[in-house]
Structure formats: C-alpha cells, structure tokens
Amino acid sequence: MKYFREISVALALLALLVALAIVAPAFFQPQPLLSLATREAPTLIVACGMALVIICRQIDISVASQFAICSVCAGLLAAMKLPLVVVLPASICIGAILGSINGALIAGLGLPSIVVTLATMVTWREALRWQRQGEFVNLPDNVQWFGLSQFAGQWTVIAVAVVLLILLAIAMKRIAAGRFVYAVGSDAEAARLAGIPPQRVTFLTFAFMGALVGLAAMMNVVQSPQVDPKSGTGIELKTIAAVVVGGVAISGGRGNLWGAFAGLLLLACVSPALTHLHVDSYWEKAIQGMIILLAVVADGIRSKRGNA
Amino acid sequence: MSAPLLQLNTITKSFDAVRALKGVSFTLNPGEVHALLGENGAGKSTLIKVITGAHQPNSGTIEINGQLVEKLTPASAHKLGIAAIYQQPALFPDLSAAENIALGLEPTSGLRRINWAQRRAQARDLLKRVGADIDPETEVRNLSMPQQQLVEIARSLGKGARILIMDEPTASLTQKEVELLFGVICDLRRQGVGIIYISHRLEEIFAVADRVTVLRDGESVATHAIGVIDKPKLIRLMVGREVAAIYPPAQTAPGQVVLSLSKVGCTKSQVHDVTFDVRAGEVFGLAGLVGAGRTELARMLFGITPTDSGTIRLNGETIQIHSPQQAIDHGIGYVPEDRRRHGVILEMSVAANATMSVHRRIFPGAWLRFGAEQELAKKYIHDLSIKTYSPDSNVNTLSGGNQQKVALARWLATGPKVLILDEPTQGVDVGAKAEIHKLIRNLAAQGLAVIMISSDLPEIMGMSDRIGVMLGGTITAILDGKSADADAVMAAALGQTQRAGEMSAQ
Amino acid sequence: MKNFVRSNLAKHEAILLVVVIAEWFYFNSVGAHFGSLDNTFDIVRHSVEIGLLALVMTPIILTGGIDLSVGSLLGLCAILFGKLWRDAGLSPATAGICTVGIGAVAGGLNATLITWLRLPPLIVTLGTYSLFRGLAEAITRGVDTFTGFPASFLFLGQERFLGMPAQAPIFVCVAIVVWLLVHRTTFGRSFRAIGFSPDGARYAGLPVDRRIAMVYVLAGIVSALAAIIYTARLGQAKADAGTGYELYAITAVVLGGTSIFGGIGTVHGTLLGVAAIAVLSNGLVHARQPREVAGMLTGLLLILALSSSVIPKIFARLRARRQTRRHDKAPNSKIQAPEKLQSSNTD
C-alpha cells in the first residue's frame, strides 16, 4: 500500500484521540486546543523544513540554536521600534544565512550533515549565551499577536503554518524543484547523471530550512510579551521525531509532508494527553524517544520482511 | 553530408595508475546506429562516461553538431541531447515510473510547475512506444530489471535525445522485448537520432548497427561498415590474438567430487533447482547472461544469501552455510565480481587484505602479530608475483590485475577446498589476465575445486573442464569444456537452439 | 599509501601536540595559577568523563558509526547509581557494578537495533539519546537529586591516589585497553575494515554484526563507568548529568584525526584531542573569559578540524581543473600529447 505509513500514523492519532474522548473528555475544550495549536504552529513550520532536509538524505540538528538566534534578533529589532514588516523578513533572512552556512559546509565541502550541524548547534548556542547571558528581550506592546486581539493573533499564527504546509506539500509534488529534492535524496549520483546538480539542491534545501526557522521563530516571538533566549530548545528532536514517525525515510527520498504533519499532531498530543491521563509530564521525553525508536523499528522490520 | 552529431578526437583518460582510454577517436552521424564492441575492460564504459560528461577526459576534444564543447558535464550533456541507458538502470527507486520519466522531461530551472496530468499521459505514451506494459504509478523499486530498463529508455526518448547511448540494453530482456526494442531503434534512426549501441551479442550488432568500432585495451582498433565485415573478423579484432593459444591446458585429470549440489535454491535470489558436482582439480565454468543467477548462486554458496532448499554436500557430508564465516570454516572461498567494493578493501594495505580472512589462524588470541603477517604477505606477493612497492602499500595504489591477485591471495591463505571466482579477469589488462589464468590452472593442479564465473566467452571456453550454463536462475545445460563450441554455449545461455544466431535478422 | 596515511596521521598528531603545548604556555603566561599542579589536576579531573566517552567513541567512528546517546546514558546511569545506592540500599561498590551492567544493556539496545534491523546508527542513537535522558528525568521527576554519598566513594572523584587524582588511574587503564584493542588486535583491524567498506568486510568473512555490536556495548559500559566517576567528582547525581557530553566526545575524536567517514584514526590522536579541549576550556576560565567562549570555540574547532581534512583535496581539484583549462586554451591544445597532460594532472 502506497500510503501505508501515513495512514497508520493517522490511525494511531485517531486512536489516541478516541481514547482521550472516553477517558478525559476535558481534553476537547476549544480554548486549550486553540492554544495547543498555536503553541505547536512554529514547530510545524520547522517540521516542514526538516522533512525537506531528511528527504534530501541529510539532517539538521542545529535548528534549535537557529531558532533561538532568530527569536532574539527579531526581538531586538522589534524593541528598536522597527515595524513588523521589517522584522519578519529580517528574521527570515537571518535564518536563511545561518542555514546557508550549514549548506555551504555540507554541500560545498562534502562534510556529513550530522557533525556539521552538531557543531553549528553548539557554536550558535554558546555564542548567543555569551552575548545575552540569558537575558530576556522585552517587546513593545504592539508586537504581541501582531497588535491584534489574542484570538485573531492565534488564528493568524495557525493560518500561516497551515497555509505554508499546504503550499509546500503541493510544491513538493507539483514543482520540479520539489522532485529534485526527492531525486537527490533517492540517489545523488543518478540525479547528477540526470542533469540535476545535487550540491546546489542540498545547499538550497539547508538555506530554505534556515529561512523557515526564521519564520517559525517569528511566529513564536509574537506569542508572548518577552523573548526567551532559550526558546526552541528541543525543537530539533521534536521535529525529527515527527518527520520520522510520519514515514519520511531517514535514508532519504521517501515520505511526504502530510505524514510529517500527522506525526507532529501525534507527538503534540502526547504532552496534553499525559496531563489529562494523570501521567507525570516528566515522561514526555522518554515517550518521545520511544516513539522515534518504535517508528524506525517498524521501518526496519518492514524492510527486512520486504527483502526476505 | 551534414556535420557529425558527435566527434571525439584522441580522448585519453586515466584512473590512478590505470590508463583506461589511450587516444580514442570516434564519430557518430545523424540517423546512424554505431556499435561499440570490445571485451570487458576494453574501455567502453569509460568512453561512454566521457560522452555523458560523467568523467572529464585528461586530454582530447569533443565536438557536438560540429561545435567544440569546452567542458562536458552531465548537465550540459543533458542539454545537448545526450542520453545514456546503462546496464544498471540509473533510476530513482523511490519515485514512480511516471515521475522518473517526468524528471527527464523537466527543464533544469526548478520553479516550473509540473502538469501531472499531461506528464502522466506523456509517460504512458512513451511507455507504450517502447512496448512496456507498466502502470506509470508503480514505484520503480517494485519493477523488475527489464521493466526498469524500459522505463529508462522511455525517459531518454522523452528527453528528445539526439544522441542515445545504449549500454547492453538487451542483457536482461526477453526475445520479444528485444524485438520491440529493435523496432524502437529503427524508428529513432529514421528520426535522425544517432545511437551508440554497445553489446556483446554479435548477432544483435549485425541486426541493427550501421557501423561498428572495436575497442581493445583502451584503444580504438578499427571502424568498419557492417556490410564489409564478418563475425570471425570482428572477433579477431576484439581479441587481437588467436583465442586457443593463450589458455593454459589442464595438467591433471579431475579427482574425487568435492562439492555436490542437488536441487539447491533460494527464493530471495530467484535461484532454484541447481544441481551439479565439482571435482578436485577441476575448473567448472559457469556461463550465462547477466542476470541468469550466476553471481546469486555464488553468494548462496558463500553464505551471504543462504540457500533455503536443496542440499549441499562437501566431501560427501551435508553442510549448512548460513554466513561467510561458516563458508570459510568449510573451506569455501569466494573472489567476488565487484573487486573494488567487495573483493578487497582499497584503503588498507596489501598485508592487511591478505590476512583479512585468516585472522583466527594467523593471530591466535586476536593479537596482531605483524611479523607473521608480513611473512604471509611476502609469500603471496612472491608466489602470485603481485607488483607492489611493499606489503604495507595500500591496495588502491595497485593496478587492477594486482588488486585481483591480492583478492586471490586472501582466499589462498585460507587453504580452501573450493574456490569460487566471479569474473576473475574483469577490468584486468591482458598480461595480468594470462597470469591469472595460469594461476587458476596451477590451483586446480594442486587439487582445488574451482568454480569460475565469466561473461567472457573465450575465457570460459578456454579455461573450463566443464561448463555449466545458467538461464533464469538454474543450470540448463552442462557441457564438456573440450568438445563444446561457443555457439552451443551461447545458444544454451539464450535458451535457444542453434537457430538463435538467426534471431532478429529481419 | 599506508605509509603515506600513517605519516600524514602522525603529522596531524604532531601538529595537535604542538597546539596543546602552545595552549598550555599561552594560558600559563596569561592566567595566574594556570600552570600549578593543583590546576593541572583540576584539568585532569574535569576531563576524565569526556575523555572516557571520547575513548570509546573512537572505535565507533572507526566503524563508520556514531553514538549520540552516550551523554544521555551517562545521565541515566548516574541517576540509577544514586537510586541503587540510596533507595535499594546497596553499597557503592555493588551499585557501581550493577550500573556498569545497566550500561552494557543500554549499549546492547543500540547494538541490537543497529545490527539486527540494519538501522542507521545516527537515528537509533538519536532515539536512545532522547529515551535515556527522558528516563532519567522520569525517574527523578526532574527534581530528585542524589547526594550525601560516603567519603569512601567520593574519594574516587575528589581525592588523590599515589599523588594523582584518584580517577586518573582508571582513565589510564581504559585508555590502554582501548588503545590495545584498536591498534594491536584483530578487532581493531575489523573496525577499520568495516569503516572503509562494510560490504568488503562481510565478503572477507569478518563477523561484521558482532564487531559493530561490540563497539556499542563497550560504549555503554564505559559510559556507565564515566557516570560513576562523574557522581563521585560532583558528589551528586542529577538527571541532567552529562548533557552535551556526546558533542565534546565527538569533537575530541574528530579533532584527534579520526575520519568521520570511518576507517582512519588513532586512539592517541583522540587523547590529544581531549587534552586540547580540556586545556582550552580551563585556560579560558583562567584568562577570565566567560565559559560560553570555550563552548563556542569547541564548536568552531570541530568545524575547522572537519574542513581541514577536505579542503586540501578541494584545492587540489581546483588546481587540476585550472591546469586542464590552461592546457585547453594553449595553442595546438587539440593535439596535445597525452603523456604531457597526464604528468600535469596528477593529484
């Protein structure tokens, strides 16, 4: 079955929701759900980028540090009373630059992405700590929720994420560049022989990932009156988990954004579900790890069967 | 007459120490099928890679449509209308057939929208043109080898290729598919497409080609129009010497049966019901086309893909082989086909490679004993006359033939009873080839049972005491090495009687 | 070629040694008390845990793998050690032995998933990275801290034995064992073979899966040992113990000349890499620089070390390309003698 993985994740999600509906109907109150969706919207944006990167047979674990840098920079710019129309593109640009650095090292020098992004992750993180010493940035009043009401702001954030998801999902299917990413991730040498430049595709994928992180950071900044310099911590694991659980093969070339979306919904529901089911929330990280392992083990068993 | 589609002038190309092309010139005219002929390792694949931009030549010039091309890259070759179909289809396994074809149709600027309805229709058309019965939505990983090849041909057609290179396109096709393909080739020729056609099957070359160029040891030996040349002459050009003379004769009569297979099979490898015996001191040749299951059989005997049916007997005892370690313990050695990936570890020294499979014997208690290692390496460097600067030189500094000898040394060190050689002289120069042949004979004379897989027909004929011919995953005929003639072996490999030679003579 | 690689590696290590010595002299001239014996012992104490992780990371990277879970496993083992001692009432020695056993099991989990299901080590250990840390947090509910260990146990991390820090002999023993394993046994030979070419190793009849399993189990065992030493040094065990240590370990290994693609590398190189990082971070503190600078420099150092292995190759390729072009543009280039070009084109 072609969409076996996507469907099974969706079924798992459905099962979780049904279980919650029976055991803890309180989960389905509109207000908490709305704030949950708002909170996870930036993660969804990053997850879209992560899906692209993993489809391209790479990985980026520096996104959390990029996220923090973009957030703080956006916060500082906003604190200088610059309008949002300037701050938003600036944040995206900063993200794109950080992503390009990864891309240049990985595509240009042919270094393994895991180690490069591990190194940039720690470099950016420590550089930010050094410069800011953990200081929060206070934002002017008109920044939170884009100066709209909270309700409208929340819906704007969610809309941005969802529209982006839909556009990207269509683009990956319909636009040649999207197919290039699949081609390079599937077999870089075959791509080269087909006239697709794998290095350029890889570089642009990382740059684009950075830009998305910049956008996501902005969508996060507008949610509170202050910018936390530690915002985004752990987002790399959460997005990688979402993408892998959603059926994007870590070996590249396979999977799609809808799967990643379903994977993220599943993971996002874990934490509130724990609260409602009266499980200690400290289990969240362990459960996240378990879900990643389960997903890859399922993949492994399936491919083992397939070969036999 | 218009300018040639493609003109190569004195192209040379070297890899490390090996010179693969030594000043090859070549022309291709519009509407021409130009066959490229040569033994394995003669430089055909390298030449193709130069034309497709995958390799940059060290010197020489390339002209396309009469214009000098400064630097040919895969992307620019693609734009100039050069397309290649390789033995191993270069498709994206994770994408569907339609998507694979569509990728060929796309402009290289990535932001254009893809009209999938149109693409799919086009893909279906193209697939129909090559006579393939494939659902365009199937993922390529789920297609069979010949199906994948047809997808690739369809993709090249879709690209509007003006220069089409076919590297052994019929190697795994059925008779019907071959005829369809020839139809497609004739169509293309009428449309003015130039086709470079590579095949080992002379019949095919006489059936479709207009001209033929013979490559030997990286040099272009001759170019002739098909009308003025016959098969024996072509073979002589390819081989460049009398076939019979160069193979060392058997020195001893075969002894007892060492390895005995009965109805051996493995579902995963699509090999079934293989039955044959190999005797001590015998060279048992395995002939057949690519994809007939020869390498798969060897991998089963070596425990990489274990057998799941039938029995294997070694010196009369039934044995199980589930892993290469077990195979070694039973005294079975395997020199694999892909030397650079499987046969040796290129980045490690000659000595380390030579002792790789005898760790337990040479290094008791797992402690490395460098003295013993050097001694063993020096012995084999001397015995097999491996040309290396020192036992500590890395294998990738050696020429192909010497690398192959290192791979052999590793197995000789295990003191095997059965040695399986998979294409032992592929990509090896003529001198080393003769040495390896002599070596194989000597090993047999020492009482080893040798199974030799080869696609090189003269080699199989000249070396084997008996020849097992494989077709469709099983042995269909076992012929006597002395009395069998090449036509009989070929006919068995094709699954046809003598009339095989006349197949698509149209 | 092997001589070439060997001499090149030796050169790499010589440069690194010079860097470490230069660092030492520099910080000695800037910072007060940097060169004192007390401070030297301090450097040793602080680098033993990362050093242990780097030691066992070396064979893993030699096989072409990676283990991101060692830092998290250190945290989990520290917690479990505390739990076994305080809540199960075991003596520190018994608890330590049990902890090492747990480390072996955790390493075995990585090994099983990687070899049995042929999953990429990267994603498996990313999963266990999350799982181990998550378990540590869940067990302690994020707040529980184990303290009040007996002095006899704290001796291991805080006192001197034979005039040197008490944990140093353990480190030296592990270093010798790993060095012998990698450089003097067939196991080390197999690790390299697998790193260069997993298929080639399989076709040579090496027990590839068992060798790969071995390095991950070893990493689990030594991570547990590092956890015990960590607990003894700080006198407490918390769920966040060893956060980010995997990065320092990988940095030390790569800095020490081990190729991230597998096959090439030495254990003494790794030891020098550990020393370079340890002296740098301690020295920066003595030079009154904020702690973050050390972390940042470590990241940059890792990128530099990685790039230094490929940049010469890229330059060589560029040079070759430029030369070819020059030849092409020269008059009569069309009938250039092949020999001539060849000699100019060797890289």
Image (spheres, rainbow, N blue to C red):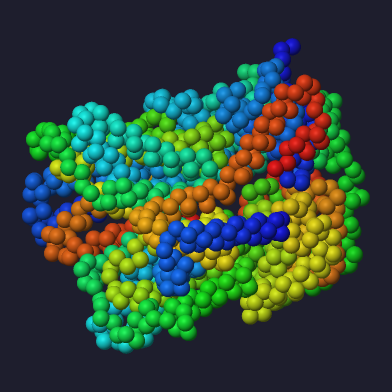
Instruction: Tell me where residue B120 appears, x and y as whole percent.
Output: 42, 29
Instruction: Tell me where residue B402 appears, x and y as whole percent.
Output: 78, 55
In the displayed structure image, the side of residue A299 where residue B239 appears, left or right: right
Identify which residue, C129 or A260, lies in the foreground: C129
Task: Give the vertical position of C168 relative to B390 (above or below).
Answer: below
Identify the residue at horizontal 30%, vertical 85% (top origin).
C150
Identify the residue at horizontal 87%, vertical 40% (top origin).
B240
Q: Specify the quadrant that holds the N terminus of chain C.
A: bottom right
Identify which residue, C52 or B340, lies in the foreground: C52
Identify which residue, B398 or B44, lies in the foreground: B398
Identify the residue at horizontal 62%, vertical 18% (top origin).
B191
Instruction: Tell me where residue C296 appears, x and y as whole percent.
Output: 40, 52
Q: Based on the displayed image, in which of its 4 quarters is residue B77 positioned?
A: top right
Q: Residue furthest top?
A: B1
**Res. B15 visible in picture:** yes
In the displayed structure image, the side of residue B165 where residue A133 appears, left or right: left
Instruction: Tell me where residue B358 appears, x and y as whole percent.
Output: 69, 72
Task: Give the vertical position of A111 relative to C23 (above or below).
Answer: above
Identify the residue at horizontal 41%, vertical 63% (top origin).
C32
